[in-house]
Image (cartoon, rainbow, N blue to C red):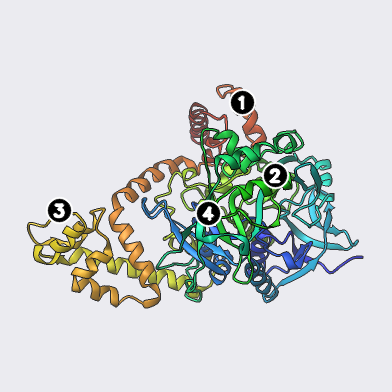
Amino acid sequence: MRWESFDIVVVGGGHAGAEATMAAARLGMKTLLITQSLDAICRMSCNPAMGGVAKGQIVREIDALGGFSGIVADQTTLQFRMLNRSKGPAMWSPRAQCDKDQFSNTWRRLLEQTPNVSLWQDEVVSLLMEGSRAAGVRTRLGVEVPARAVVLTNGTFLRGLIHVGDNSWSGGRLSESAADGLSQQLLEMGFEVERLKTGTPMRVDGRSIRFDKLQEQPGDTDPQKFSFLDATHPVTSQMPCYMAYTSHATHEILRTGFDRSPLYTGRIQGRGPRYCPSIEDKIVRFADKDRHQIFVEPEGRNTNSYYLNGFSSSLPLEVQLEALHSMVGFEEARILKPGYAIEYDYFPPTQLRYTLETLRVENLYFAGQINGTTGYEEAACQGLMAGANAAFKLLGREPFVLTRTQAYIGVLIDDLVSKGVDEPYRMFTSRAEYRTLLRQDNADERLTPLAFERGLVSSERMERVAAKREAVQQLISAVEKASVTPEEADEMLAQKESAPLTQRTRLVNLLLRPEVSLGDLRAISEPLEDAVQLLPEALRDEVCESAEIAVKYQRYIEKEQEVAGRIMKFENLKLPSDMDYFSLTALSYESREKMSRLRPQTIGQASRISGVSPADISVLIVYMNHRTES
C-alpha cells in the first residue's frame, strides 16, 4: 500500500522522536511520526525524572531553542530540586521528578494538537531508497510512506534483547516487541553496527514500603521550573522522595545469583553505562563498601509504584526479591515489575555529520540511543537538532550546528561525532570546557537569539529574552551604585560570620563575598529592594539569580571568555573536505587514518578525535596557513 507523501518521517516515539517531530513541524514541514505504540509516546521507561547534573542544563537549552521537554516536565512535576547549590553556579543543575503517565499523555496531546504533525502506529521495517538518498519508509503492515527525509530515533528497540536471570527474550522494553528489520538493512548498506546494554530497576508497591524507616528527601522550599516561558509555573504540591541503603547482607544475597547473571555468564555482550552501573556491578567494583544509597522515588500521583534509583539489576527474580527484603523498610515489599537488562543495536556516531545526517545515506538522520547515548535529555536534544537540520536542508538553508562554547548540546554532538562512544554516553559538567559560560540560568540568553534567527522560536519569546537581559543590567547597575554604612550592614555580616565594615561600602563589594547573597543585601538596602520591585514580576527571580551570578563570578566568566576566544581563533578554521591526510607524512599514522575516515570539518573537530595529538594539530595549522598564503 502506497501512502501519501511527507516532507519528513520520524521513526520512534521516544524523547528524541517527539522533539524531532515538533522541530520539523514548527519549521513548516509536513511530518509523520511512526511509533509502535501511540500509548507509549515519551514513556519514561527508566526513572521518571528530567534533569540532574548537566542534564538539567540540557533541558534548559532545549527550552531556549523552542523545544518542549522543559514545558512538559514543568506541567508534570512531582518534586523539584536544584542540585549542587553548595558549589559554584556552573554546577547548579535543575532536576524534576515527574508523573510518569501524565508526562507521556501530555506529550501525546501536544503532538496531536500541533499543525503539520501526523501520527501512525506501526513498526518501520526498512527504508525506501532512491540511489544513495533516503526516500521514505516501509512498515510491518506493508505501508510505504514516501518522504524527502527520514529521522531514526529507535531507542533500545533495534534487535532489543531483554535479560532477567536465566531468561532472555526479544523486546524493546518490558512487554514491548523489538524492531528487527532496520538493523539488517543498514548493515547491508555498509553502516557499522555495534551493541550496548542498559538496565532498569524493579518497581515496588508503595503500600508495602515502610517509609517511616527511610530518610525523607523533600523538594526545594522555593521550587523553580525548567521552561523560561511565563506560561509554565513551579510545582505547588510536592511529593517526597526517600533514601534507603543496601547492607552487607544485601550484597551477600546478590552474589548468590552471579552464576545465573547474564552479566557474568557471558550472555550479555554489549557494554553498559559505567556511570550508572547495575547493583551487581557496584558490589563487584566497590567491594570495600558495606552499603550503597538507593533513592526511592514516586512514579506518579495516582499510582503506588515507586522507582528504586540505584538498584538496577538483571539477576534472577527470586534473588532480586530476597535482596530487596534484606533492606531496612522493604522487609515485606512487593515487586510490581522486575529489574531487567536490555541489549540493543547502535550505530557508532562517527558515521554522522554534525547535523546528525549520516555520511553514507543522504537525508537520513540518527538521534538518541541509536547514536550510543543514554538518558532522556541527551536523546531529546539530539532529536531537536536532527529534526531542525532535516527541515533546514529541505528548505535549502544553512545547517544549524552549535559549538562547544555555545551549549552543552554542542559539546554532546561534538563528542559523539568526533570521538564516538564505546559505552552509553552520558553528559557531565566535566565534559564541558566552558561550563562557567554554559550555565543553566543563562541558556535563554545564549541560545534563544540563535533559535530566533532560524525560525525555531517566536518574536514574543525573543522579546522576553531582551527584556530579561535589560533587567539584569539594570539590577547590576543598582548594586554597583548603592552603598551601606557599617551601622546598616554589620548585624547581617555578623550573622553570616563575615568581617564587619569600617566605612560606607558599595553593595557590589559586599556581594563579592562568598557568604553574602543578593537576598541579604536586599534586606539591608532600601534602594536595592526598590530596584528589585521595579522588575517585571514574571522575570524577577530569574533576573536576581542571573545578576548575582554575573557579579560574583565576573572574573571567572571573563577569563573563560578570553580562553574560549583564543581557542576559537583556530576552532573554526575549516579543513578541505577532500583533504588527503595520508600525504601529510608529518602526521602520525593513527591521525592520518582516523581523520581520513572521520573527515573533520574544522581544526577544532580534528583536535577532539581520540588519538589525534596536539603535535598533529600544529601540523594541520601550519599546513592550512601555508595553503592560505600560497
Q: Is residue 611 above or below residue 279?
A: above
Give the amino acid type for the residue marked by disc 2 in the picture.
Val
- Secondary element at image label 4: helix
> Which residue position holds label 2?
319
- In the rendered image, residue 446, in percent from the top left (x then y), is placed at 45, 59
> Which residue position holds label 3?
499
Between disc 4 and disc 1, whose residue precedes?
4
Could you tell me if the residues under marks 2 and 1 are in contact, i.e. CB atoms within 8 Å? no
Mark-to-mark CA distance, 3 and 2: 58 Å
Q: Is residue 274 visible?
A: no
- In the rendered image, residue 268, in percent from the top left (x then y), is placed at 74, 38
**Which numbered mark, 3 or 2, is in the foreground of this view?**
2
> Which residue position holds label 4?
55
Could you tell me if the residues under marks 4 and 1 are in contact, i.e. CB atoms within 8 Å? no
Between disc 3 and disc 4, whose residue precedes?
4
Mark-to-mark CA distance, 2 and 1: 47 Å
Mark-to-mark CA distance, 3 and 4: 38 Å
**Which numbered mark, 2 or 4, is in the foreground of this view?**
2
